[in-house]
Amino acid sequence: MEITIDDLLKVVKECIKDEEELKVINKAYLYAYSCHKDKSRKNGESYITHPLNVAMILTDLNVDYITISAALLHETINHGGSSKEIIDDMFGHDISMIVDAISKINKLTLYDDKESSAMKLRKVMVGLSEDVRVLYVKLADRLHNMRTIWALDDHARKEKIIETENVLIPIAARLGINTIKSELEDLCLKYSKPDIYNEILERLENTHDELNNELEDMKAEISQILTEHGIKFKIKGRVKSVHSIYEKMVNGHKWDEIYDILALRIIVEKVEECYLVIGLIHSKFRPLPNRFKDYIAMPKGNMYQSLHTSIFGVDSYVFEVQVRTYEMDEVAEKGIASHWSYKEHSDGSVTNIMEEKLELFRNLIEQNDDNSSDTDFENTINSEFLGKMIYCFTPKGDVIELPISSTPVDFAYRIHSKVGDTCVGAIVNNKIVPLDSQLNDGDIVNIKIDKTSTPSKEWLNFVKTTQAKNKIKSFFSKQDREHYIEIGKELLEKEIRKRKLSINEVLSNDHINKLTQDLKLENLEDIYLSLGSLRYTPTFIINSIYEDKKDVSDILLKKVEKLSNYKEKIDYKSDIIVSGTSNIKISLANCCHPIKGDAIKGYITKGEGITVHKIDCPNIKNETKRLIDVDWNKNSDNTYLTTIAIKVDNDKNRLLDIIAVSSSKNIYIDSIKTKEDTSNITYKFKVRVSNLQELNNLIINLENLSYVISVERVMD
């Protein structure tokens, strides 16, 4: 969309009246224009169109002049030759801080590799947590980029989609910015699974007139009822988004089983009228059982408020109905910050709410010593940011939002870390309960504290939230780290003296730099820590220094061979077992994608630990020296990616039906590629399964479909 500064200022002036603030916005545009002059985006547009569009998106969220100005300037550091110091001098600290934060975030890139991808996700979230206005500019920036993502190559497009789905959409959801969240979801689906998106869109368009007629008839019926009772209202009707329909199909619903495609929103002036409207509608149209939700009395954690119900409307169509006030509607669509005036609110009421939300993001990524996989990270996102929540109360009536299955300890840490650390007991609904008991929706929780008490490691066995886990781990890691560093130092110095070597010579700067580079550690303290925690032995460290002719993979091979007959029981934490050791870096090969149950071999990769391949993988068939025996850890419960090719007749598109079969088996589809010729269609599905048996069961179920010609597992 071609937008000029005049277009932007025309919209901005509807909300911002201060002439000085408007001058700052205009000054920001002029400076941004000078930085981006004669530059073009990949889609061929003038570069200045991007910051103008980002600023225009933000005008719909009622943000302040600082946020609009920062949006106009947000690319001037990375792509305009400016600096934080220049912007600070020209526009002040608040604007320069936001622009600098966005500049740093936009330098981060997600990769397909599991470990690095998860780390990048964490780093993105750390950067986003400084100021809520940073989040708003970043979300608007990504929305405009997603609108023009067709201009990127396939690899860059995939990176943007992964980051958007795993980081930015959950943030938009938690901040309650529904307008941006919904559009991002549809755009991600459109470009990641175009076949599915287009098929759903085509089916909606085929019934477009019929659905719109039903909406208009239902709006007329309800309008008549409300007018007769003297209620002033505004009513909106819509067909649900493509992404929301796709989600239902992923959950196993066939197209003919999706009833509530139509939605109505009724906006009234007063809270009491919301309940009156629901009563009037239920008196005329039969509600579906167990579909009424009262988010007015019990708001969501992002301050979303509304009444929800589903009814059988005209012609037996099912309608989802939402009823709310005008203020509630603004918060629901634009987020909490639509009511945040940065200058006028001095009591911090909204600021504290926003800080609470940002603190949840910080806690999610502050796992410095936690070697969790990207699957764990994804599960946490789904559980704590996208999953179903419960709403409990403090004795004073404050609402605390928690994931399902949370405990009083989770509740305590949600209030404050000091409350969690000193928690000694809990009273729920006037009854004393154990700290590991599960809370239910609507519970009133009273936490008992003792200022002399400290956390228990046993809590890690039952707490649900990442926030609680991290606070508990942080408490103990601070105690343990110094202890392990001291032990490691003593062990290494003892071994050096035993070999009659000089401590200063062994631990010279060159040797320390070599060790930190080879072992991927930060400094000497980390070396001591790895020794004290028994990750490495002093002999291994010294040999790593002086065996200059051997690289790390040679030493690793020798270590594995030596320990291959070691029989002592070890607590293996990896999916893969290498006899006698549990501290070697192990990854699954991206070429053959082994899954639990496959016959496998380990290949020692230079500088990268052990890569596990299927035993018949072509990439290792000629290798002999660096292959070692490995086994699956039977106690592991992770899932694994693999690829299957499904060939079907091309009588008609069968994609949604195949997805329904996969979803009914609780198998997650990571990506889909389609290849079509004159006689058939081949779908290449990348799926995530628990083991070989689960994959084989899926293949059998797909082969039983009448239109399926063949199903086979393939390499990428």
Image: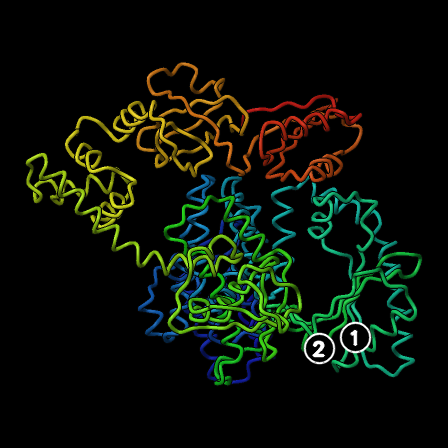
Q: Position of residue 669 (x, y in %)?
A: 63, 38
Task: Specify whether residue 337 is in view.
Answer: yes
Which of the pair 104/229 is nearer the observer?
Answer: 229
Position of residue 540 relative to residue 649, above or below, is below
On residue 234, the disc is 1
Q: Quadrant of the C terminus?
A: top right
Q: Are marks 2 and 1 in contact (CB under 8 Å)?
A: yes
Q: How many marks?
A: 2
Q: Residues within 10 Å of mark 2 (few under 14, many from 20)?
A: some
Q: Quadrant of the N terminus?
A: bottom right
Which of the pair 251/97 is nearer the observer?
Answer: 251
Task: Specify whether residue 237 is in view.
Answer: no
Q: Amino acid at mark 1?
A: Lys
Which of the pair 517/216 is nearer the observer?
Answer: 517
Query: Could you say whether the residue bearing mark 2 is in a helix, strand or loop?
Result: helix
Q: Amino acid at mark 2?
A: Tyr
Query: Could you say whether the residue bearing mark 1 is in a helix, strand or loop?
Result: strand
Q: Quadrant of residue 546?
A: top left
Position of residue 419 relative to residue 477, above or below, is below
Q: Position of residue 39 (x, y in %)?
A: 44, 55
Which of the pair 611/540 is nearer the observer?
Answer: 540
Give the distance between the C-alpha atoms of the residues marked 2 and 1, in whole angstroms. 9 Å
* Residue 174 shown left or right of residue 272 in the figure: left
Q: Position of residue 606 (x, y in %)?
A: 31, 29
Which residue sits at x=51%, y=59%?
A: 141
Q: Position of residue 620 (x, y in %)?
A: 42, 19
Residue at the disc numbered 2: 326
Badge 2 or badge 1: first in the primary sequence? 1
Q: Residues within 10 Å of mark 1 (few under 14, many from 20)?
A: few
Position of residue 102 relative to residue 673, above or below, is below
* Residue 90 shown left or right of residue 640 in the figure: left
